[in-house]
Image (cartoon, coloured by chain):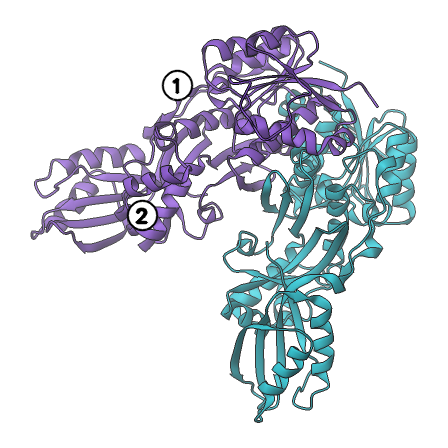
Chain colours: A cyan, B purple
Amino acid sequence: MKDPLKIGLAGLGTVGVGVVKILQHHSDLISKRAGRPIQIIAISARDQGKDRGVDLSGYEWVKNFSTMSNHNGLDLVVEMIGGAEGAVKDFVYSSIKNNKHVVTANKALLAHHGADLAQLASDNAVSVGYEAAIAGGIPIVKTLREGLAANNITGVFGILNGTCNYILTEMRETGRDFEDVLKEAQDKGYAEADPTFDVDGIDAAHKLTLLTALGFGVKPDFGALSITGIRDVSADDIKFAADMGYKIKLLGIAKRSGDKILQRMEPCLVKKTSAIGNVEGVFNAVCVKGDFVNEVLNVGPGAGEGPTASAIVADIIDIARGNVPPMFGVDAKTLQHASWADANDIQSACYLHLEVKDQSGVIADITSVLKNHNVSINKFIQPGFNDNGTESIVMITHKGQYKDILAGMIALEKLDSILTKPKHLRVEEI
Amino acid sequence: MKDPLKIGLAGLGTVGVGVVKILQHHSDLISKRAGRPIQIIAISARDQGKDRGVDLSGYEWVKNFSTMSNHNGLDLVVEMIGGAEGAVKDFVYSSIKNNKHVVTANKALLAHHGADLAQLASDNAVSVGYEAAIAGGIPIVKTLREGLAANNITGVFGILNGTCNYILTEMRETGRDFEDVLKEAQDKGYAEADPTFDVDGIDAAHKLTLLTALGFGVKPDFGALSITGIRDVSADDIKFAADMGYKIKLLGIAKRSGDKILQRMEPCLVKKTSAIGNVEGVFNAVCVKGDFVNEVLNVGPGAGEGPTASAIVADIIDIARGNVPPMFGVDAKTLQHASWADANDIQSACYLHLEVKDQSGVIADITSVLKNHNVSINKFIQPGFNDNGTESIVMITHKGQYKDILAGMIALEKLDSILTKPKHLRVEEI
């Protein structure tokens, strides 16, 4: 058997402890699968004294994780601290420059500096593994980069944040409002005290940026991404969508649109009966469409100690075996600056939700405005009066130019009979 | 860029033509992903003159595919002829002995000779790629062997035959009988003129044998597999199961049972609301359970020109990149002879379907017999009288020893009031 792969772990939170557990419990199995032993040599975390429930006595304790980057006894470092800038970024960069492989779950770092890191890794002939950075335990990097490598990828669609999917599922199943369910999720530990990163779509958008790069061979470009979170999705929206055969999901979408790429993170309506519509609770899912394979859907746990550690150790095994594909599937030098599609050019059906005065002629006014903006109505429901005496009107439009919908929304807002800012969500056909 | 990988194609049926199309249409993309060009050098098929809709003029036509195994200009041969024995087997063996990589969709060959081939490939330092042999376009070999390599796999569950899944879906949706739907599937080209291989579970069982080997690091052992197809599933069974919240799916099951492995191919009841229960029509799905990842479900097209060719070309790209993991995930020498669990020891709930005389005391007799065999009833329905005046009784038992159910079935058959052989199907919790 070959020499052991010697690794250092920077960060011993939940995921770091999970990695230690796997490597301790499955050391024989993993040696067999990797063709060589994988040895933890050094570890680093903020608090050395803390009881983490695993035996760390055999490992060298490194006070400052940064110094692992030039530790002579390490072939690979696992970065499990997080953060896109500062000391963590410096650590990853210097580790690569010192010819160490890096495995990380740090989606923010990669979403912001991925292209740069891919080039640096290539220059130093090392691998940067990031299976754990997207969709937790689901091996989607491997699926997209290797398993579907024969295809021209035409679209990638993902439920990429378990917290949001849990909240939307709970809202639908119980009819409760966003704030109420969020509070409960926080109490249960499914959502952070500051939920911004999750519910505003930032975390999922980091992941989408990487999926887009992998699928289309382009540089990750977080800044180019249009991001809408789930704060404005109401219990009513979810109910009305359900009445018309849809569920609302926070979707990461990257798809070809002519010679451009459309990349969006937004709550969308998907058919209730669709495979992705059936993914509920904290699960993640990624649907990949390719010109030869048609489509493949992967569903699994998007976070948590075991699943995330499973993905990290899979990367370590791959590197131990010598499988080091280019970070985004093609040589870093050939990664393109994507040409991003303009939202105005999207062809889409939309869900519209209007609050109106209960007065005659309202519907005629609305449909006339929409018609003037080339928006044609496919389904229409009037769920009835609200507690405050106003009335909701809900529609699904026929597929059309998104810019027409946006213009129609602005025109509707000017009508006297429209009481609140008209709300719309796109319908995504997957 | 490195030297091209030179390949020969044996067999130019649907899948072979798909492979040619991908390599022609995506030659630049694939060169980028593989880090080197992939060149078709030689091709072979029965009929040279046939128009296959692709330009084959640039390739060397080989009259007898067997001779490709010692063709000096080839690094890799793709076997797309099929059959577990004879000339095809010899071709694969001699190609490996002549240090050529092999990529194949031939599940029968691998299910019967997999362990032997793994050793031969290892001895000759070549790879045998078989992503296309299991679940078509779904990259399940890659997911299981590499993506989930950090886990002790505890179970693999699959819908592995699209024809069967299509037939069962149609039967449920239309209420029609097996024979009727099979006939239609044959007319539409979804089922072969001789459907034995599909509907009797043989094709799916070949695939399961390989999944078991991959998941548990054991020698593929087709002979050890208990196989039941879908011929005896009636429209009534499907309806009764649905009435109680279940769907019937032909499932490949491989799971740990103590220190043994349980491996079965059989129609089972799964919860209507389960992820695998929602996989309908010609789709395939594989659910993998691991001790750290919990579970991952992959869904996609299980057959067809594009998906199967996608999987074959993914293997070719992997080999071109130098990623050659051991065939079943661990060194061939360490593959174990599995210790197979005895069906008697399965703990399972069961669906029972009895046809009885309409007379008093029948239910008391039946429940008494079952009680004497330690079979306890969880759900019970009497769907009503059949056209011939008999009555159906349908039950789901509590979870118990499978051998008790089997003994109970034999005892029930002896009752005067039971008119036909009692039918049972296991309920699988996934």
Is residue B416 visible to the viewer in this orientation of the structure? yes
User: Percent x, y for residue B115?
Assistant: 52, 14
Most foreground residue, B217 or A112: A112
Q: Amino acid at mark 2?
A: Ile
Classify mark 2: helix, strand or loop.
helix
Q: Is residue B161 left or right of residue A229?
A: left
Work out how far the residue at label 2 is from the one at label 1, CA to CA, in angstroms. Answer: 29 Å
Tell me whether the residue at label 2 lies in contact with that at label 1, contact meaning CB atoms closer than 8 angstroms: no
Q: Is residue B36 left or right of residue B328?
A: right
Mark 2 crowdedness (10 Å alpha carbons): few <14, some 14-19, many ≥20: many
* Above or below B187: residue B390: below
Q: Is residue B332 left or right of residue A195?
A: left
Most foreground residue, B101 or B28: B28
Read off the chain for label 1.
Answer: B
Q: Amino acid at mark 1?
A: Gly
Q: Is residue B352 left or right of residue A429?
A: left
Most foreground residue, A83 or B82: B82
The numbered mark at residue B223 is 1
The numbered mark at residue A400 is none
* Above or below A406: residue A342: above
Is residue A54 visible to the viewer in this orientation of the structure? no
Q: Quadrant of residue A262?
A: bottom right
The N terminus of chain A sits in image quarter: top right
User: Percent x, y for residue A113?
Assistant: 87, 46
User: Percent x, y for residue B187?
Assistant: 37, 39
The numbered mark at residue B238 is 2
